Image (spheres, rainbow, N blue to C red):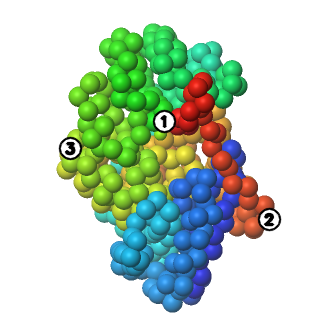
Amino acid sequence: MKITDIKCFPTNVGSGSQLIVKVETSNGIYGWGCSGLSGRELAVVGAIEHFRSLLVGKSPLHIGAIWQDLYRGQYFEGGRVLTAAISAIDIALHDIKAKALGVPVYDLLGGKQRDYIDCFASLRFRTFDDLMEKARILKKEGWKIFRLAPAEFEADSKGYFEPRESIVILADWLTKLRQEVGPEITIGIDYHHRLTAAETYSFMQRMPRGTIDFIEEPIRDESPEAYESLRKMIDVPFAIGEEFASKWQFLPYLERNITQYARIDVCNVGGITESMKVVAMAEAHYIDLMPHNPLGSICTAATIHVAAACTNFSWLEEVNTPAENMGTNDKAFYPVQPQLEGPRYKLPTEPGLGVEFNEELASKQEFKPVEIPRLHKKDGSYTNW
Ligand SMILES: [Mg+2]
């Protein structure tokens, strides 16, 4: 069996954009992969154009060697664009190999270690009422882990974000949320690196102990040293890592126990091959995976197989819940996809990833890259979205 072609499908699905990659082979088996570099899909298409000529004619079964070839095969190795491209190809190669062997992908990774994959609900909200209503729906439907994605700054449509105003509002709302949902719900908040270390400290000081169970990426992650200083200032666990593009980026955060959850993104970190190495590094430090999963069904499926095959796993991100549907797993694009049963996925049992993409539909679509909103402070200066 040889690789015969690699095709790219940058596609708008639901409210997001996704780059789907198909690897075709000489015996008719094909594999699906997905790149996670949202908003810069066309850069990844360019990287895959480079990789196509290197891979056509090679065996798709030598996944580890292909990973090394693609990573080391240029003087300027690594970086998010290249590892997003490698991720998509690596996931597709696992799909092909598992289909060729007639097994689910997790059987290539040591076999399943759990029977289902627990999820956390990504709860997006702009107003207090919005937050409380969605929390009530999720609790009623049996969801127990809420990861809040605040967008309170969008409520007045002025397009600015003032950290000191945000922390006062959100600390108040979260204190009331805890009173409403009770102690059995796990609550985390993704501050989407909009704060400084000092602002994060103030945010935590404004809530009673036990209000939140973890905080995701309050500050940017380029500096492990900055996070290390913040680690000493507050006493809630961190969830960090969705932007990391290799095991080397995870290394300081795991080795120094800066983060308590590894927010790995299988479609950015380097695919299933690199994910399983991060899994082992995290396990050595008693750190659980809490995978980033904002894309579509290929990302979900690939992550489910990694989660099934490791012991150190907490919850998978789910953006399509009873409280909100982002449409990123639209059945028209994904006629075969992992099935959510309440707040968990049952494990796929069919050979491969257990997902099918409608390339005919994607081919007809005119792709429109999605730009993230740009946020400013009131004085006009840039801040993070
Ligand atoms: Mg996040």
Going by the image, does 213 lie left or right of 255? right
Identify the secondary structure beneath mark 3: loop
Q: Is residue 357 above or below residue 250?
A: below
Q: Is residue 141 visible?
A: no
Answer with the quarter of the image where residue 152 lies: top right
Q: Find out whether the residues at labels 2 and 3 contact each other: C-beta distance under 8 Å.
A: no
Q: Find disc 1 in the rendering and name its residue.
A: 192
The amino acid type of the residue labelled 1 equals His
Q: Find disc 3 in the rendering and name its residue.
A: 256
What residue do we see at 30% from left, 37% from top?
226
CA neighbours of label 2 inside 10 A, class few (<14), some (14 to 19), many (20+): few
Q: Nearer the viewer, mark 2 or mark 3?
A: 3
Answer with the quarter of the image where residue 187 lies: top left
The CB of the residue at mark 1 lies under 8 Å from ligand 1: yes
User: Residue 364, which numbered label?
Assistant: 2
Give how far across and how far down residue 307 sits, in percent: 39, 51
The amino acid type of the residue labelled 2 equals Lys
Who comes first in sequence, dot 2 or dot 1?
A: 1
